[in-house]
Image (tube, helix red, strand yellow):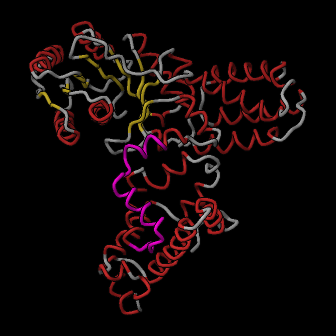
Amino acid sequence: MFDSLTSRLTQALKQVSGKAKLSEDNIKDTLREVRMALLEADVALSVVKSFIERIKERAVGQEVAKSLTPGQAFIKIVQSELEKVMGEFCEELNLAAQPPAVILVAGLQGAGKTTSIAKLARWLKERKNKKVTVVSADIYRPAAIKQLETLANEVGADFFPSSVEQIPVDIARNAIAHAKQRFSDVVIIDTAGRLHVDADMMDEIKALHAAINPIETLFVVDAMTGQDAANTAKAFNEALPLSGVILTKADGDSRGGAALSVRHITGKPIKFIGVGEKTDALEPFYPDRLASRILDMGDVLSLIEEAERKIDKKKADKFVKKVKKGKKFDLNDFRDQLEQMRNMGGIGSLMDKLPGMGQMSGMVEKQVNDKSLGQMEAMICSMTPRERRYPDAINNSRKRRITAGSGTQIQDLNRLLKQHKQMQKMMKKFSKKGGMANMMRGMSNMMPPSGGFPR
């Protein structure tokens, strides 16, 4: 996420990171690079101008001059100003209303409204323990109603049926009445995708908003449209009293212009960020964490929270006990680790959140990516239980059978067995005294100078 912005900013800030003293000249050079990085990331010009001005003002003041490490102090200022541009802190949904709390969702055609509603329903159900009813007031696209029904079933939300013959205001009122009867905590109303220049459509959503008076009015916008996302959100905000923004498709956006422009231009907070196609790929928007990720400092807090939610604790505890007892790390264990990694969002998601990995993630993903993880799992699943426990028993004829069964090549299997051997050695070090230090040394030895995994 935002790879090109991360790459440009970290390169620009390297110039000052180790400086014992900062002069106006080297600050000026660095700020020029930072300005170019932001403009290339499609951040709105007004945002770039005020951002650079604030950094310049703070950098030439006492804050940096009195620091023992001026270079680091400068980077801290950049991080702090990035957070301010995006809103400083996470603004949660306001659900303080007599149930059901009504959330109205608006946005352009193709921005990902319906999928975002399903993701939000799942997030409310799993993280906030809320009963959620969803309804589609999109009377122009019958497929939208069916799509929402399918997604509601997938995430375990209550779906209120509607049809294209109905009026959006009636659909919404009936859905709220139904949600009250079902004792739902939240009702989320999907609306038709519209262009902000379409006066009739805008009048329709204004009437809908006035009729139901939602506690939250969220605007869904595609991150890949860059600063246009912020301008569109601003136009909608002039027609509707928006309470926040959901930024979708952030995982496909290497620039980051929308994330850095929306709050400044609209004055409205980004409340959620969509980071994938699956219904669990929605995260609350934390400006401080995203600023760290943009500057390649990682996002360990989000990684820990994700691990808490998605890692099978029983399996993890069993695995740790096994390793501590010095038992052999077999291919069943290896497959379990691959599965846990996939549950955590795959290689890309993990790399994005680890400090200092932004510059390496491209190289690492060329070597080991989500496709290769799937191949590894397929090869292990093609083995007999005995082969998984005793990989040394896998001879050439067994290799041919395993690769034929998994649709892979002999060299793929050889690579898997080699990586397993290295993991096995690492786990052996972990079981001894000073285990974690030994294990970290083992991991660093596994990484060749290029940053890729062994092949």
Judge whether 215 appears above or below 359 on screen: above
Residue closer to the observer: 38 or 201: 38
Quarter residue 430 falls in = bottom right
Residue closer to the observer: 103 or 441: 441
Magenta: main secondary structure:
helix
Give the residue at x 63% y 43%: 296
Residue closer to the observer: 145 or 119: 119
Query: Residue 336 appears at what percent x and percent y?
Result: 37, 63
Query: Residue 225 appears at what percent x and percent y?
Result: 48, 33
Residue closer to the observer: 302 or 36: 302
Q: Specify start and end residues of the magenta stretch as a single range.
A: 304-331
Q: Is residue 182 left or right of residue 248?
A: left
Query: Residue 47 appears at what percent x and percent y?
Result: 63, 22
Judge whether 79 appears above or below 409 on screen: above
| Count of marks, rendered view | 0
Quarter residue 254 falls in = top right
* Residue 117 belongs to magenta span: no
Q: Is residue 2 left or right of residue 138?
A: right
Q: Is residue 133 left or right of residue 82?
A: left
Q: Is residue 60 left or right of residue 391?
A: right
Quarter residue 288 falls in = top right
Give the residue at x 30% y 30%: 124
